[in-house]
Image (cartoon, rainbow, N blue to C red):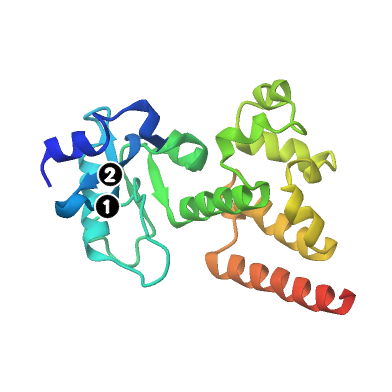
Amino acid sequence: MSFNDIQLATQDFSRANCIGGGGFGQVYKGKLAHTNNVHSTIVVKKLDKTQGERQYYNELQILYKYNHENAKVGDFGLSLISPINQKTNFTIDHPCGTRDYVDPMYLKSGILTVESDVYSFGVALFEILCGRATYTIPRRKSVSLLSFIKYKSLLSFIKYKFENGKEDDVVFKAIKEEIVPESLSTFLNIVYKCLDEDRENRPTMKDVLVQLEKALEIQDKLYDAGA
């Protein structure tokens, strides 16, 4: 696909076609024209700086190599392709990525560990709980923008909510109406542990899976009983 085709498909990377962004640049949707007046939808990421070229190339290599038969896997901005010894659980790289998803300790030290992935996964779980991306959380009527700015980071904001018994303030209404309290408590607890500032206190992904399955089991059991 030529660059000219991409420009035409995205209307020269029009702001109206921008559907997201991150540490490397913006993501655009577009319509690629084919013969017989047939179009196909494409998604394009445009780098806005050269600093992350190597990391972005790694991301592309992974996307070319891996596929999954069910929804589409993407966004490996912090991924590394190197012959790291299996006994090593960390590597050093230039800190980059979308701020709210990146392990705060990685930003400070430049050392990426398996616990960094746990943190990022915790952010994704938190977004599921809130029903929206982290950067839009302050826009909710139940969340004070001033309060969010005061605590400056997602981690501090979540800690404030938990420590003051206000975690329900950020739970998506549809989830709060359906989920049973014990299941919600189990889910919230594992999310909070994933986002612990101290890497040593974060659970393993195996532990996370066990707790998520437990939350689902509780939900199914009590919800069916109530029905």
For the residue pair 206 and 222, the one nearer the viewer reads as 222
For residue 103, above or below residue 88: above
Q: Is residue 142 above or below residue 180?
A: above
Q: In the depicted view, which residue is nearer to us: 98 or 160?
A: 98
Q: Is residue 116 visible?
A: yes
User: Residue lying farthest right?
Assistant: 226
* Image side of residue 37 versus residue 208, left or right: left
Type of amino acid under label 2: Lys
* Pointer 2 or 1: first along the chain: 2
Between 102 and 94, which is closer to the camera in this rendering?
Answer: 102
Residue 28: numbered disc? none
* Quarter-of-image position of residue 110: top left
In the rendered structure, the answer to whether residue 220 lies left or right of residue 103 reads right
Neighbourhood count class around disc 1 (C-alpha, 10 Å): few under 14, some 14–19, many 20 upward = few
**CA distance separating discs 2 and 1:** 6 Å
The quadrant holding residue 50 is: top left
Badge 2 density bin: few <14, some 14–19, many ≥20, Cα 10 Å: some
Q: Which mark is residue 40?
A: 1
Q: Element at badge 1?
A: strand
Say what amino acid the circle numbered 1 marks. Answer: Ser
Residue at numbered disc 2: 31
Residue 116 percent location from the top left of the image:
47, 50
Specify whether residue 195 is in view.
Answer: no
Residue at the limit of the structure toward the front, as seen here: 36
Which residue is depicted at the point 35% across and 69% down? 68
In the rendering, at what x and y percent does residue 183 appear?
Answer: 77, 65
Q: Secondary structure at mark 2?
A: strand
> Viewed as shown, does residue 206 lie left or right of 165?
left
Is the Cβ of the residue at disc 2 closer than 8 Å to that at disc 1?
A: yes
Observer-nearest of 39 and 166: 39
